[in-house]
Amino acid sequence: MKPALVLFDLDGTLVDSRPGIVHSLRETLALHTVALEADHDFTWCIGASLWKIFEHYLNTTDQHVLSGAVAQYRHIYRDGPMFEYDIYDGVIDTLAAIKADGARICIATAKAHEYAREIIEVSKLEPYIDHVYGSELDGRNVDKRDLLRHVLAEERIAPELSVMIGDRNHDIDGALANGVHAVGVRYGYGSADEIQHAHICVDTAAELPRAIASIVPQSR
């Protein structure tokens, strides 16, 4: 049995977008007089909710303050940094192989869908992506469990015929909560420990077609 739907996280799975995200976070935090060391590790922020990120760094749960910081970040990010990324080695060939096998390929990212769509539309990934799903600007569907529930309803494809590929625990947890097969990638931003509960994990994008083929038949 082949998968009918293959979902990919964006940041840390298809593209290395750390430079643009870190750039935007630093500028936004500077507006709030938050100074961080030059080598501060923002890895945990990639793929996380912007509201959670600013709740941490601004040390507040005030929704007015958090929404303002999120809006500032998005303004900075959209003004150029969101295009500061590199496509991971092997991704294009992998997408081509999955598409040739007849699966529908969609993006499922916590990033606002309108930004994710802009990124995809002008990238080398565009010919292989059927649809881009992401969070809403008001924060809806930023949780991968909610996002994947929405995707499955929109796509009308059974969970057992679907695969979610990602580098963070949010991706794996979202897949498992919805009965979707989960594939973890170790080359992204997540640690090996946080994705170890996936059905299978890979070290490179080139391994993904074989990994998908090895887990989907197990549902029958």
Image (cartoon, rainbow, N blue to C red):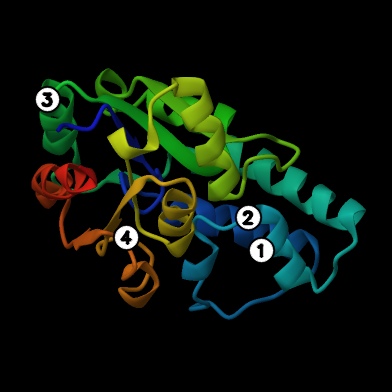
Q: Position of residue 85 (x, y in %)?
A: 37, 45
Residue type, label 4? Gly
Please tell me the numbered disc located at residue 188. 4
Q: Position of residue 15 (x, y in %)?
A: 33, 46
Q: Quadrant of the C terminus?
A: top left
Q: Earlier in the sequence, mark 4 or mark 3?
A: 3
Which residue position is annotated with label 1?
53
For the residues labelled 2 and 1, say whether their Cβ atoms are less than 8 Å apart.
yes
In the rendered view, tell whether residue 179 sits above or below residue 149: below
Label 3 crowd (10 A; few <14 / some 14-19 / many >=20) = few
Q: Secondary structure at mark 3?
A: loop
> Depth-wise, is mark 4 or mark 3 nearer the camera?
3
Q: Secondary structure at mark 1?
A: helix
Q: Earlier in the sequence, mark 4 or mark 2?
A: 2
Label 2 crowd (10 A; few <14 / some 14-19 / many >=20) = some
Position of 43 with respect to 50 (left or right) is: left
Which residue position is annotated with label 2?
49
In the rendered view, tell whether residue 160 sits above or below residue 173: above
For the residues labelled 1 and 3, say whether their Cβ atoms are less than 8 Å apart.
no
Which residue position is annotated with label 3?
101
Q: CA distance from mark 4 to mark 2?
A: 17 Å
